[in-house]
Amino acid sequence: MLNIALIQKSVYSFISFLISVMSAKAISEQTGKDFLYKYICTSAAVQNRFRYANVTPETDFDRLAQEHPWLLTERLVVKPDQLIKRRGKLGLVGVNLDLSGVKEWLKPRLMRETTVGKARGILKNFLIEPFVPHKQEEEFYVCIYATREGDYVLFHHEGGVDVGDVDAKAKKLLIGVDEKISEDTVTKELLTHVPNDKKVVLASFIVGLFNLYEDLFFTYLEINPLVVTKDGVYVLDMAAKIDATADYICKAKWGDVEFPPPFGREAYPEEAYIADLDAKSGASLKLTLLNPRGRIWTMVAGGGASVVYSDTICDLGGVNELANYGEYSGAPSEQQTYDYAKTILSLMTREKHPDGKVLIIGGSIANFTNVAATFKGIVRAIKDYQVPLKEHEVTIFVRRGGPNYQEGLRVMGEVGKTTGIPIHVFGTETHMTAIVGMALGHRPIPNQPPVAAHTANFLLNSSGSTSTPASSRTASFSENATRGGASPAKKTKIGASVAKGTTLFSKHTKTIVWGMQTRAVQGMLDFDYVCSRVEPSVAAMVYPFTGDHKQKFYWGHKEILIPVYKNMSDAMKKHQDVDVLISFASLRSAFDSTMETMQYPQIHTIAIIAEGIPEAHTRKIIKAADEKGITVIGPATVGGIKPGCFKIGNTGGMLDNILASKLYRPGSVAYVSRSGGMSNELNNIISRTTDGVFEGVAIGGDRYPGSVFTDHVLRYQDTPGVKMIVVLGEIGGTEEYKICQAIKESRITKPVVCWCIGTCATMFSSEVQFGHAGACANQASETAVAKNKALKEAGAFVPKSFDELGDIIKSVYDDLVAKGVIQPAEEVPPPTVPMDYSWARELGLIRKPASFMTSICDERGQELIYAGMPITEVFKSEIGLGGTLGLLWFQRRLPKYACQFIEMCLMVTADHGPAVSGAHNTIVCARAGKDLISSLTSGLLTIGDRFGGALDAAAKQFSKAFDSGMLPMEFVNKMKKDGKLIMGIGHRVKSINNPDMRVQILKDFVKQHFPSSQLLDYALDVEKITTSKKPNLILNVDGLIGVAFVDLLRTCGGFTRDEADEFVEIGALNGIFVLGRSMGFIGHYLDQKRLKQGLYRHPWDDISYVLPEHMSM
């Protein structure tokens, strides 16, 4: 019998190939102690609080001594603070030194390369602390670490460098999830070998330490040694990890935490750049540089797929040439993908390699990401870097599947032809990792790869097989005939208080979807329809941010309405046949909404899609679910699928993949995976090598998934329709060993094909952040290599690599068919489902005239664009408001003087007092209690030929006269003869003797900066004639702006004569007055509100009442 306890041995002895977790991130010793000193609550006297000094190559020791005077008076300890374990054993701790001794000790070490295990790195960050004289018997060891069932506190009465195998020696205390720790329990369980005079102090300190650990979301905290003397408690050496996903909870206490890179790997600026992109995006973007001089580069979509590709490269001998690890997933935008791709292309084209380089753009079959859209970003980057890519002899291999992948592959192939870069593209017809063998020369490159059915091919079954198993189909369709029922089963989880059902989903399963995920819901309804379900599987949606309403969806060809509720309780009361919840809640609200859902006994299964939920919250969800007998799928999952019955959210991808993978009816193979993307790849592999999938579940990539492998494997064992089981495990955890144990004990008798991804981990010399939070080997037994070996020894079918997984599955399936266990049946074609208009248009299958056209602004991309100019460039260029107006009104980048003139026009037209009609109307409206928009509109509606609207008219009249060759006097005489006013001439107050300074300012600017001012000169000549007749017939501000703008448009070099005339004709110049005067009108509105002016009524004595005489008599 397999000894599980043996497997769990040495949990805290982290090996050199430790694989970093996305959520649990190591912090520096200084950061850990800073948290401890700030927030620990204990009666124990914690000494040397905040007494540490940081030393880097830039440190000025004189200044350091001023900041920390104790450095000059006390004996000191110095050590590197770079996530290095067992520093004492490695001779990396200087003890009992004075400050000059510290300097001497640092000389041969600071900025020197050293080797720790397999890793080689530069020592560049050191910590100096006071030396604490003490006896050996005053040293203790304490460690707290998280597990699925709770947190273990380890304590040993002998600490220090020679502590040895603490797992075998130490006392252990498990504090279950939601349980409290007490000093009495600590004393009784942990301190049995501690001298009596130290028990009280240690008990108080350990309780305080545990509470700190919980409050600040630590996942690991080790102090060795912890020294207790008569003066108090000293924390000498400390190692810790915190749950980085809890940042939104702990930000106030954590502050801005810096997570240092693992020793042996430098922190590259490109990694920081991608990390910043990731933080600002809803998608996932990861990059780790392993060997910047390597010749094998990867750009992989999906967390699980990225591990599989790294495994395959290492398996085929490319570990020393593998340059990077990374992944992009979660439907990044075209711009985000472009930024990610150009970063990688920039890195790989900095140094040449004698054998050239290869770029592997791979991925599993996407569930919901538009592959063509993300490939557009990659194609842009390839075009930008085509010259260096050819200079470095880069060959690119592409393999991808998912929504619109054919278009993505076509575009990728085209860019290869147009740029001359060798690009080989493959789709779902090619095994996922086959391109690795091609890239590394281990398998030939096909000249004509098979062409898969188009994404638009919804109406045809593209499967090559015409048969399906009658037995499994019948079993699936007839199982659990009562709606919403779940069959009872043996308790499959140790410690669960209520047994969970063997059957999670049936053809009658009904669900509530939390979140306004209309695309996912429509995908579920389309799946229901092709599975010939009688009713939709989605009964209702819950969305707290809107009121109760109904949302329109399609059921086949007809439209249906699905109710949306503001709160969960209403949805549950009105839909009591629902037993499944699919939660698309965000990582911040998923915990609360899930805990609320579990209050309703009708719920048997919950799928949590969100990634990044703090582990402490997930463990509380698991505990509550176990107590209530609820199966939880996730967090960090795409969900699961039961062909012919039910699918969770986006699982299985779009309809073309549903049809291609035969997911509309049950097969004989059930699988369980961590990765959502890889689960879709399993759908593809299983459909090509067997009669198809019976059920598949992606349990999620987090360290503590709501349900584990054995929960589902044992369900499959007890399900008659399942004939064989496939498990895709991964590095980290020990769940696969429970499968080994169940096989050996004959609890599992059906054939199990199993492969654990992450075999490359043992080949890396330093830590690598894999895509899944649970991809973490804390000990040798948790590595993928060890688990694959154990599974094979237990009797599971284990391939040599992921490359051979399909072959093993086919071999086992063929054997079952030969034995008569599986009897294939004839295929039944599914109903046809029309394609959504929006998706058909995105695929380019239809076209429709647009309702609107625009040429000035585009907000659809990563960045707002004004007339082709990105908003960041608008600010960098400092073109100001005038330049921005030039882009949006004239679609030109105007000269600097033109931008200044526009801004001057806006300034001089901003206001002209409260007496003018527009301001008057605005004031009256504001005093009537109307809002700003109404008051502003009231003022703007007065603008016309008589008030403010003379700019266009003046420009047109003067231009026409000037262009026709009419002399100024002729123009004046003609206008008088026609009985028309000359627009832009005349002022109520100003005159030739009382000039308008606004006009003077603008006139001087035009004369000084404009290349030519012919029309302005013509207007000034007209002014001489009109003022000779009457002093107030001056060229007013409207007229000057009108004629000067015509000069600007005609002479700045940015417009043709026709374009300049067109802008005048369509009213662009009046826009200047409207925009400028709006500022004044708003000012008047705010002024009246601030002065609290009441309703305006015009006085009688200012009104002349003129009535007909017979009425007055």
Image: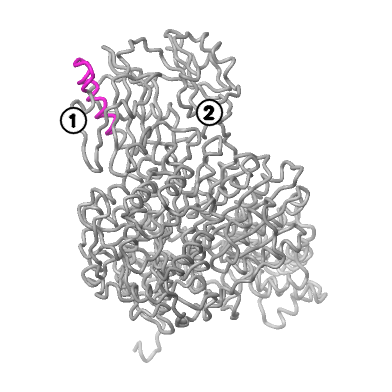
Residue 391, x across and y down, in percent: 78, 49
> Which residue is found at the position 45% from the left and 14% from the top?
77
Label 1: state its secondary structure: helix
Residue 1030, x across and y down, in percent: 67, 68
* Left or right for 999, reference 650: right
Q: Mark number for residue 592?
A: none
Label 2: state its secondary structure: loop
Q: How crowded is mark 1: few (under 14 residues within 10 Å), some or many (20 or more)?
A: few
Q: Could you say which is closer to the camera, residue 799 or residue 1090?
A: 799
Q: Of callouts 2 and 1, which one flags the residue occurring earlier in the amino acid sequence?
A: 2
Q: Which residues make up the magenta segment?
A: 192-211
- The residue singled out by tag 1 in the image is 185
- The residue singled out by tag 2 in the image is 117
From this viewpoint, is residue 245 visible?
Answer: yes
198 part of magenta stretch: yes
**Disc 2 to disc 1: CB gap under 8 Å:** no
Q: Could you say which is closer to the camera, residue 348 or residue 396?
A: 396
467 part of magenta stretch: no
* Left or right for 1003, reference 172: right
Outermost residue, left side: 184
Mark closer to the observer (2, 1)? 2
Q: Could you say which is closer to the camera, residue 841 or residue 142?
A: 142
Outermost residue, front side: 819
